Image (cartoon, grey):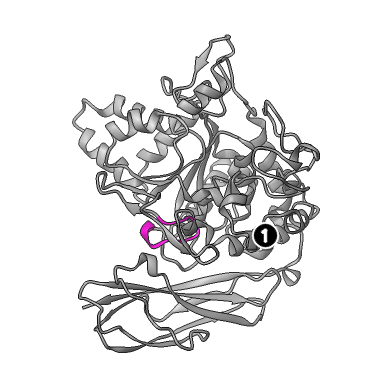
Amino acid sequence: MRRIFCFVVLFISVLTVCSQTTKPRTIVTTDGELDDVDSFIRMLLHANEFKIEGLVISSSMWHYKGDGKGTKFTSEMEMTKKLYGERTELRWPGTDWIFNLINAYGEVYPNLNLHAPDFPTPAYLLSVTRIGNIDFEGEMEKDTEGSDFIKAKLLDENPEPLYLQVWGGTNTIARSLKSIEDQYKNSPQWDAVYKKVCDKAILYTILDQDATYRKYIAKHWPDIKIYYNASQFWCFAYFWKRAVPPQWHHFMEGKFMGPIINNGSRLLKMYYSYGDGNPPAGEIEDIYSDPEKIKNNMWGSFTQYDFISEGDSPAFFHLMDVGLDNLNNPHFGGWGGRMVQSSVAPNRWEDGEQVVDFNPFTQKMDAAYPQTRWVDVLQNEFAARAAWCVQPYKNANHPPVVKVEQSWMTVKPGQRIKLQAKASDPDGNMIRYTWWQYHEVDTYAGKLVLADNTKSNLTLTIPPDAKRGDDIHLILSATDSGTPALTRYGRVVLKVR
């Protein structure tokens, strides 16, 4: 009987893996900061969109446990070196938080599955949760359960890309790579193993939160791809009041966020917000939960239930297929921001001053706007998925489905073409269409005239000054009339010949 049971479990597991191969594989590494907690909660609400292969607690320049022996440590990073000096530990939130969140997710999991398929079970998430290198910032001298787990995934026989989300430091990932190097570097298998890992691993990092990427990964594994978000994530981080246009602040304020957080589910109640009376674990100075201290702190002036930070959420936003075709084309731009290939490191895509979009609110080019431009739709998406935790299907909103007839077209200058698309809404809502040119992504220098761009089909003329080799990116936004309104997209890339 036991053998039959094991066979059935194995068979079901194989079917599960096979059914999810079209979704990107990912491992999240996190240091447990309050904004990691908030990003983690949002990620759980989107967990049907990607295949979570691991959840690993790591350390960072802002959070480390210490070795329990009183060993003193000074940060390698200039900012935290000046701020904190010599420490035996730093703002450590512990490790219980991740298990508590998964357990709370278990309470809403049955309801989430009523709204969309493929949400992972809480038991599965617990089974892939590990503790990595957490004693100190940048510690990568020893193997841990977390580093061993990542190592095994990098060496497994699944050739699909494995997106390694870096919400804290890269040290646990660095340790897993170092362990692979130590095992294979001087063996006949090294070249094949090196290629296998580099072909598979893709890092999505939010800033550098320790020195292990610079000191080890970039030097020893230069062919591993990295998507580096250092400028754009701020619209979802502590500085959001400076990055998000004032006209959209209401999407981040308590009037919008309060009903989401207080929707009756324990999971959303664990989401940190300003003035919520819930002190973040490990904080040296709590400037967040106290209703008085939030009126004027280092990040601005806030009111109860205002958004604090989800600085790491762009890492999984990038993995969601919403029709923008950005997963394998980070330069296309999408919910996870927009990066361009480095001119000196071909396996590195990065943002910064060379990646700017026109901000219609300020009428200026803006290095944060490639991420900021999606704030309104992302916040509506969050509100809808929070409702999925507690509402029956008929009382909640679900995103429309968009299909374009051709996502790539070859065109000639002066040619008149028709782009065809269609959208359907699972709730029977009306759909509002808008075609727009993502001009900053184009290699064509001009701008198209898009007349009558509010229908599913669009007729246009290719400008006569378009040159051979130019490409033009046209986006169809389809927004339903539900509450909150949800948006999906179609992208058409026109290649001039």
Please, what is the dominant secondary structure of the magenta stretch? loop
Quadrant in which the N terminus is drawn: top right
Rendered position, 350 above or below 453 = above
Q: Amino acid at mark 1?
A: Phe
Crowd tier of the residue under label 1, counting other residues whose Cα lies within 10 Å: few below 14, some 14–19, many 20 or above = many
- Residue in the image at 33% along x and 73% along y: 472
Q: Nearer the viewer, residue 250 or 100?
A: 250
- Residue in the image at 76% along x and 42% along y: 295
Find residue 193 and report its horizontal and vertical position in percent.
27, 37
* Left or right of residue 178: residue 124: right
Find residue 453 and report its horizontal and vertical position in percent.
48, 84
- Residue in the image at 44% along x and 23% along y: 76
* Left or right of residue 206: residue 197: left
* Left or right of residue 247: residue 288: right
- Residue in the image at 60% along x and 81% along y: 431
Rendered position, 206 above or below 460 = above
Residue with the mark numbered 1: 251
Find residue 214 and report its horizontal and vertical position in percent.
35, 32
Q: Is residue 15 visible?
A: no
Residue 337 lies within the magenta run: yes
Q: Nearer the viewer, residue 9 or 254?
A: 254
Rendered position, 408 above or below 260 = below
Find residue 301 and report its horizontal and vertical position in percent.
71, 45
Q: Nearer the viewer, residue 429 or 393?
A: 429
| Range of magenta residues | 328-338
